[in-house]
Image (spheres, rainbow, N blue to C red):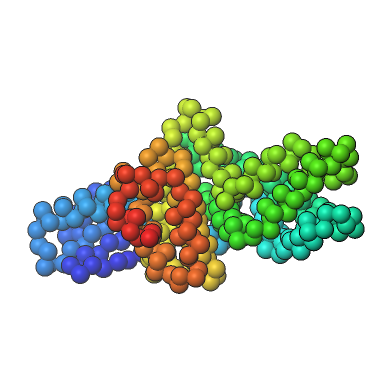
């Protein structure tokens, strides 16, 4: 990637492994930043002084350390031999994701049948009609809930792989791009599922009617056949799941928090750095033309935005001070700006997710500028 500033400064990021610091015969100075990148600085004669070059290196070095610049191939990344075991496990779960979203998108509910049954409580035929309409829908809701549990286990496997020593989170994401892609696909699915769920009140209405009917029949010492599939314990767990505005995101948030608490030998920063690095990489890819032009699918832009928002929300739930504090490793202003540069109809749901599903937006530590951007 090559960028040229107004001052004639050329920054070239080249992947290398050893540390290199040197001055070429033409006066170019190269400096290793971190463990994987060299910044090659060629100053035009207009800048002149070595002191100016040194100051620029300090600024650029700090920026690059805070925000890694590399292309994460969300479209074509394939697993290496080292990634294969985890990749196969997660892939088996993700294969169901498209079907789950398609079922949810076509979920129309049994509103009409339920209304008729409630308005005519003495009409047994209408009661049976409503019950027969609701039962297959509840079975579908059970499948969605059970899928969330498998997704939780898949996320845990990915977190273990992407935070394990001896590599830093940035190195993991760059080396294990197929796993990073699967992590991104889980986040993309999660936000897509929750957007559909939030705009479909029939889900909770159907399930509430189902539970009321089960309770009424239990009081009358009647047991319906559907109880064998969704017993009282399962119904309670499903009720808690669907009571959440964003149930899949809540599942991932709880899973990430649990992962951190159970792995006491793993510093929490390893997990939060994995999330902040992913957010940064997505933002850089979205705002850099040289990276955007490598997307071959028109949907990849939206995919990248969903992933960025998903990791921000997870970071905000897991990190003690959240994503909006000044000490946060996520450039929230930059991320929000990238979203707002897109057509409003494609990002309003993502902006709402930042407004209403994050934990620390309204904290005193959040700047007025960031709050204003999300107004």
Tell me the quadrant of the picture where the C terminus can be found. bottom left
Residue at image x 64%, y 45%?
A: 241
The outermost residue toward the top is 265
Residue at x 46%, y 40% (from the top left corner): 318
In-front residue for pair 320/186? 320
- Number of callouts in the render? 0
The quarter holding residue 30 reads bottom left
Instruction: State left or right for residue 205 relative to residue 113.
Output: left
**Which is more toward the observer, 137 or 77?**
137
State left or right for residue 22 relative to residue 354. left
Rendered residue at 26%/68% (across/down): 4
Is residue 73 visible in the rendered structure shown here?
no
Residue 160 in percent (x, y) is at 54, 38
**Rendered location of residue 264, percent (x, y):** 48, 27
Q: Is residue 143 left or right of residue 168?
A: right
Is residue 106 in view? yes
The quadrant in which the N terminus is found is: bottom left
Q: Residue 352 at what x, y percent from top left?
A: 47, 59
Q: Position of residue 368 (x, y in %)?
A: 29, 53
**Residue at left offset 74%, top offset 39%:** 234
């Amino acid at each position: 990637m090559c960028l040229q500033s107004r001052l004639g400064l050329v920054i070239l990021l080249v992947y290398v492994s050893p540390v290199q610091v040197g001055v070429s015969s033409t006066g170019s100075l190269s400096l290793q930043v971190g463990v994987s990148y060299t910044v090659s600085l060629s100053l035009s004669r207009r800048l002149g002084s070595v002191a100016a070059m040194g100051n620029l290196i300090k600024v650029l070095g700090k920026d690059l350390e805070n925000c890694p610049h590399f292309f994460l191939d969300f479209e074509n990344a394939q697993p290496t031999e080292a990634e294969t075991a985890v990749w196969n496990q997660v892939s088996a779960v993700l294969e169901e994701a498209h079907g789950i979203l398609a079922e949810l998108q076509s979920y129309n509910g049994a509103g009409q049948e339920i209304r008729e049954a409630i308005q005519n409580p003495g009409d047994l035929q209408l009661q049976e009609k409503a019950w027969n309409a609701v039962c297959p829908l509840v079975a579908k809701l059970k499948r969605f809930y059970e899928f969330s549990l498998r997704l939780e286990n898949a996320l845990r496997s990915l977190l273990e792989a992407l935070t394990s020593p001896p590599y830093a989170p940035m190195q993991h994401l760059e080396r294990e791009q197929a796993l990073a892609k699967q992590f991104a696909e889980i986040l993309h699915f999660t936000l897509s599922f929750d957007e559909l769920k939030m705009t479909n009140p029939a889900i909770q209405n159907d399930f509430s009617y189902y539970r009321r009917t089960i309770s009424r029949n239990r009081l009358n010492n009647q047991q319906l056949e559907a109880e064998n599939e969704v017993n009282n314990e399962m119904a309670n767990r499903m009720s808690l799941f669907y009571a959440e505005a964003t149930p899949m995101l809540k599942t991932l948030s709880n899973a990430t928090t649990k992962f951190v608490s159970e792995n006491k030998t793993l510093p929490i920063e390893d997990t939060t750095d994995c999330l902040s690095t992913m957010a940064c990489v997505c933002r850089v890819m979205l705002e850099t033309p040289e990276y955007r032009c490598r997307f071959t699918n028109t949907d990849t832009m939206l995919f990248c935005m969903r992933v960025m928002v998903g990791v921000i929300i997870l970071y905000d739930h897991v990190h003690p001070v959240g994503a909006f504090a000044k000490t946060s490793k996520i450039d929230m202003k930059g991320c929000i700006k990238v979203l707002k540069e897109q057509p409003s109809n494609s990002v309003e749901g993502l902006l709402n997710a930042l407004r209403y599903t994050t934990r620390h937006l309204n904290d005193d530590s959040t700047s007025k500028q960031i709050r204003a951007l999300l107004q």
